[in-house]
Amino acid sequence: MNRLEKKLERPPYIHNWVRNIGPDLQSTIKILVRLALGFPTKTYGAAAPIIRDRIVYSLDRETAAIAAMTTGRINSRSLVAEYVNAFCDFDDSRRYSGKPTYDEMIEPFRIGKGLSVPVKPLVNIVENGKLIPIFSVGWASLPFNKFQQRLFETVLEDAIFSLTDFRMSTGEFVFFPRESKHKNAARKAVIWKRGDMDKLPAEELSDCLHMYSQALEAAKAILREMPQREIRPGKKPDTPNPDQYGFDW
């Protein structure tokens, strides 16, 4: 198994894995091949601990902005700052106030033989007596179609809300798409809560996972026949958009 095949054997976090599910077998194969060949040179990853501290410790906006512009990859800091600022705008009205619990929780969702997708809330808090897992990502556009929304809801119900302590939980998934396609357009919070989307029937979920398994094997076969990509000295790889497939947080 070459390094590109191995990359596909390590599924990304659930919010990005769902984006890898196309409407049919061929489109999913193409998405997976593209994922394997991608170079994640920009990322929103540095925003996660900043936003977590905003939720848990009410981190002030100025400190959050400084952290966003001084941590993580230099070429990603403007994106991180944009995301963090949008979250602070949202929290000015939402005002999270809960205490953290189940720190660093990661639950597996089985998608095939020996393969699981990690399901990781940004943070779990207890707010007004309710346990609330919070997911948040920095996407600048709404990436899910209706089926993917339902798949996401289905996976969360299985991996998180089926656990004894979470069965009565609410949950929030928050992201901040731009209001238009202009690169400087303002971001506005979109909030999904548990139950906003209908779960997939068991048969439909089974069909989806079977299709994904077929696509995964087909994508690995394609990659197996490709020469291993090497970056020549002095030549930089293409810089992908962190809102594209496969980027975490």
Image (spheres, rainbow, N blue to C red):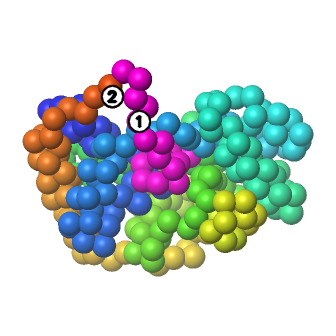
Q: Residue at x 69, y 71 (%)?
A: 179
Residue 41 shown left or right of residue 98 in the figure? left
Q: Residue at x 89, y 40 (%)?
A: 62
Q: Depth check: 229 or 84 in front?
A: 229
Residue 190 visible in the picture: no
Confirm whether the magenta stretch covers residue 121.
Answer: no
What amino acid type should be assigned to the residue bearing mark 2?
A: Ile
Q: Position of residue 77 (x, y in %)?
A: 68, 37
Q: Position of residue 245 (x, y in %)?
A: 42, 53
Q: Residue at x 26, y 50 (%)?
A: 33
* Main secondary structure of the magenta stretch: loop
Secondary structure beneath label 2: loop
Mark 2 is surrounded, within 10 Å at the Cα level, by few (under 14), some (14 to 19) or many (20 or more) other residues, namely few
List the single residue furthest toward the top: 233
* Residue indicated by mark 1: 237
Work out whether 10 lies above or below 193. above
Q: Residue at x 74, y 44 (%)?
A: 81
Secondary structure beneath label 1: loop
Residue 75 shown left or right of residue 201 in the figure? right
Q: Depth check: 172 or 27 in front?
A: 27
* Residue indicated by mark 2: 231
Numbered mark located on residue 162 in the image: none
Q: Which residues are magenta?
A: 233-249
Mark 1 is surrounded, within 10 Å at the Cα level, by few (under 14), some (14 to 19) or many (20 or more) other residues, namely few
What amino acid type should be assigned to the residue bearing mark 1?
A: Pro
